[in-house]
Image: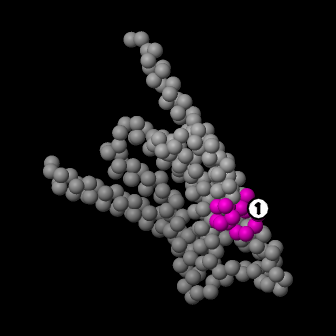
Amino acid sequence: MSANDSFVTHLIELRNRLLRIVVVLLLVVIALFPFANDIYHFLAMPLLQSLPSGGQMIATDVTTPFFVPMKVVLLSACVISLPHSLYQIWTFIAPGLYTHERRMIWPLIFASTLLFLCGMAFAYFLVFPVVFGFISNTAPEGVAVMTDIGNYLDFAMSLFVAFGLAFEVPVAVVLMVTANLVTVAALREARAYVIVGAFVLGAILTPPDVISQFMLAVPLWILYEAGILVASLMQRHRAEKPAATSHYVP
């Protein structure tokens, strides 16, 4: 097979994988479509519970009541179909990987997906009530707190992404150590800078209250320490493996 034929074959394979991802995504969207308003209501529950008596959410555009729940359905479908999408990507790139890389990729994919979902859950169940309670309690007297549903979705998605990426820190640490980009000792020495950076990110990515800043910075620091622990255990196992095999007597 010529190089040109091989390239065309890879393009066809990539097209087929992408089509499968899109088809499954559309099927999930269709399945969730009848529950669009219920899903949005679940997403908005932390804010609705924090609003004062008589408070409500509003829609300022004519098409917002329809398109905003549809966006939520699409985002929910992306999360639900994520394992299938990752599997299609994996089957496409697996033939070009070494054996040890194939052994690592599945745990990394599983860990990164689980940690991102944990970050979203942490934001929804713990951060949202604190943030919205703070906002509602600090509103000036006589000001009715009524948030546009489109603006709320944008705000919620930004916090989901911020906390989801923050929870990916252990995966990033392990990858850097595995690729020999940095050593565990260097990561430990940089601990003080990481702590300061975590609180700076907390101040930038969260609303201007101290509690929510701590709720992003402290988990970020803890996850960084967890990444160092996992990377050091992996290094120790890798160092002990040759020693164990060198004493093997056939």
Magenta part of the chain:
200-214
Residue type at tag 1: Ile
* Of residues 216 and 147, the one drawn nearer to the viewer in this rendering: 216
Mark 1: which secondary structure?
Answer: helix
In the image, farthest residue toward the top? 249
The reply to whether the magenta stretch includes residue 201 is: yes
Q: On the picture, is 146 further left or further right than 171? A: right
Position of residue 159 measured from the top left corner of the image (x, y, whole percent): 63, 65
Q: Main secondary structure of the magenta part?
A: helix
The reply to whether the magenta stretch includes residue 13 is: no
Quarter of the picture containing the C terminus is top left
* Of residues 84 and 155, the one drawn nearer to the viewer in this rendering: 155
In the displayed structure, 89 sits above or below 134; it is above
* Of residues 80 and 125, the one drawn nearer to the viewer in this rendering: 125
In the displayed structure, 225 sits above or below 71; it is above
How crowded pointer 1 is (Cα within 10 Å; few <14, some 14-19, many 20+) is rated as some
Position of residue 61 measured from the top left corner of the image (x, y, whole percent): 58, 87
Position of residue 69 measured from the top left corner of the image (x, y, whole percent): 57, 74
**Which residue is the site of mark 1?**
211
- Determine the residue positioned at 67% across, 61% down: 200
Q: On the picture, is 58 further left or further right than 170? A: right
Image quadrant assignment for residue 14? bottom left
- Determine the residue positioned at 50% across, 68% down: 74
Q: How is the image coloured?
A: one colour
Camera sees residue 126? no
